[in-house]
Image (spheres, coloured by chain):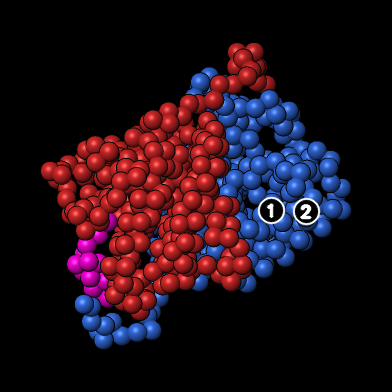
Chain colours: A blue, B red
Amino acid sequence: MKSDDYRVRPGKKISLNDVPTDDARGCTKEEALVRKPQLLLHLTKLQERLYAEEKQSLLVVLQTRDAGGKDGTVKHVFTGLNPQGVNVTPFKEPTPVEQGHDFLWRVHPHTPAAGMIGIFNRSYYEDVLVTRVHGEVRTGEVERRFEQICAFEELLQSQGTRILKFHLHISKDEQKQRFQERLDNPEKQWKFSANDLSERKLWDEYTGAYEDMLRSTTTDTAPWYVIPADRKWFRNDVISRIVLETLTDMDPQFPEVTFDPKTIHLR
Amino acid sequence: MKSDDYRVRPGKKISLNDVPTDDARGCTKEEALVRKPQLLLHLTKLQERLYAEEKQSLLVVLQTRDAGGKDGTVKHVFTGLNPQGVNVTPFKEPTPVEQGHDFLWRVHPHTPAAGMIGIFNRSYYEDVLVTRVHGEVRTGEVERRFEQICAFEELLQSQGTRILKFHLHISKDEQKQRFQERLDNPEKQWKFSANDLSERKLWDEYTGAYEDMLRSTTTDTAPWYVIPADRKWFRNDVISRIVLETLTDMDPQFPEVTFDPKTIHLR
C-alpha cells in the first residue's frame, strides 16, 4: 500500500463518484487480519514514546456520511492503545451555548495536548457540510470557513500537532445495507434515527459539499485521505497503516534526563 | 476473591502498616493471566452497553505513592476498552489559575458524562494528602475538605455516576526497587524526579494522611479499596474484577427505540 494513493492533492478537483468505495488494491482480508496485531504493536510502542516525549501530538479527524464507519474506525484502529494517551471527542449537534460562538470555539479545548493522540469523531468540518447542505450558511460564508479552518490547523501545527484527516468513502448501497443491519439488530437499533433517512435523500448534495471541502482544505501538511470504506477490514487496515507511517515519521523520543542516574543513591 | 476483603468500612479506623502489600490470597500469576482476556471480554461488552445506554457512568479514582502503579493500572486494566468510552485524566500540580479556585473546580469538568468510564490518575484527594503533609493546609481545613469531597461525590452519584476509589498499597522496599528500575532503564528515567526522593522521606507522614483520608471518605456507595500492589499482576487482577463486578451490578441496557423498525423501508 502507498498512502499517497489515498491522499487528496492540494488544488486538484476531486470527483468522489469516480473514486471506488470497495477497492482493496489486491489486498486480502486474511493479510489484513494477520497484519493487525503487528500494526498495533508498533503503534503502542510509538504511542508510549510520544507520551513520554510530550512535545508533539497527533490529531486524527474522521468524517463520513451516516453509518460511514466513524465509530467502527475508532473501535478497531485505536482500541489497544493506552487510553491515557488517547482522547476521543465525538462532536454532536451544537448546543445553544456553542451556537453563540464561532464554530471553532467548542473544538479548541479538545485539541490534543503535547504527548497525546486526539481523535475527532465528526469535527468542525460538519460546519461546512451539514449546515451548507441545509442552506444554513451561504456559499460565501463556506469559503470563508475553509480559510478559517486552514488558519486554525496551521495554528495547531505550529505547536507540534500533526493532522490527519480521513473521509470514509462508502457507496449509497453500502449505507442502505448498514442501515438495514441496524434496524434488524435489537442491539444496534439505538444507532438508527429518522434523521438518517432525510439525510440520505440529500446524498448528491453531500457529495458536492464533500468535494468542495476536500479540495479547499487539503494541504501538504494537513492532508485529507479518501479511504475506500465499504469493506471495514480494508478501511481499518489502511488507516492503521497511515497512522503508523505518520507516527514513525514524527519519530518521538524518550526524553533525556538532566541528572546523572548514577549519582542517585536510594535509601 | 471477594472484593469486600479490600473494601474500607465506613467509620472504622484503618492501620495501613497492618495491611499486607504483597498478599495474593492464594491466587497465582498463571491464574490471573489466564483470567485476564476473559475479564477484558466481559468488560468490553458491558462498556458497550454503558455507552449505548447513556444513563449511568463510572468514575475510577486511583491514588497511591510515587511509583505506586497508577500508570501501570491504567495501562493494564483499561487498555483494550474502546477509547471512545474511556476518559483518563491525570491531575498534576495545580496551575496558578487552578489555585485561584476551590480545589474541586479543576476536577468537575472531567467527571464522566453519562455512558462514559472516567479514570482519575491522582485526583482531588491530593488536596488532603500532599498539601497536608507539606503543611500547606491546617488540620481543620483538611476535615472540612473531607466533608466537601463527600458532598461532591454525592452530587455525582445523584446523577448516575458510580464511584470506585483504589489506594494502591505498596511497601517502602517495593518503592525503592521501582525507583531503582527507573534509574537503571534509559527508557524509564524520565519518570524519575528528584522530588520523589524528598517525598519518600515523608513516608510515615503520608501513611497517616492516607489513613485519615480512607477513614473519612469511604462510604457505602463510594467505597475506598486498599489493594495489595507490590505484585503488579495481582493488583491488575483484583482491580479488573472489582470494576467488572461493579459494571455487572450497574447492569446497563441497550436503549429501546421509540419507533417500530419493521415500518421503516429503505430506498
What residue is disc 2 on? A101
Cα–Cα span, label 1 and label 2: 8 Å
Picture coordinates of residue B224, whole percent (x, y): 35, 47
Element at badge 1? Answer: loop
Q: Amino acid at mark 1?
A: Arg
Nearer the observer, B215 or B20: B215
Q: Position of residue B66 (x, y in %)?
A: 33, 66
Residue at the left extreme?
B26
Q: Is residue B210 above or below residue B163?
A: below
| Position above or below: B177 against A262 | above
Q: Which span of residues is magenta-colored?
A: B169-184
Point 50% across, 21% down: residue = A185
The subunit carrying tag 2 is A
Quadrant containing the C terminus of chain A is bottom left
Residues marked 1 and 2, same chain: yes
The residue located at (70%, 63%) in the rendering is: A152
In the image, residue A81 lies at what x, y percent?
41, 52
Query: How crowded is the residue under tag 1: few (<14 C-alpha within 10 Å), some, or many (20+)?
Result: some
Tell me whether circle 1 and circle 2 mark residues in contact (CB < 8 Å). yes
The circle drawn on residue B160 is none
x%, y% of residue B144?
49, 56
Residue A49 found in image quarter: bottom left
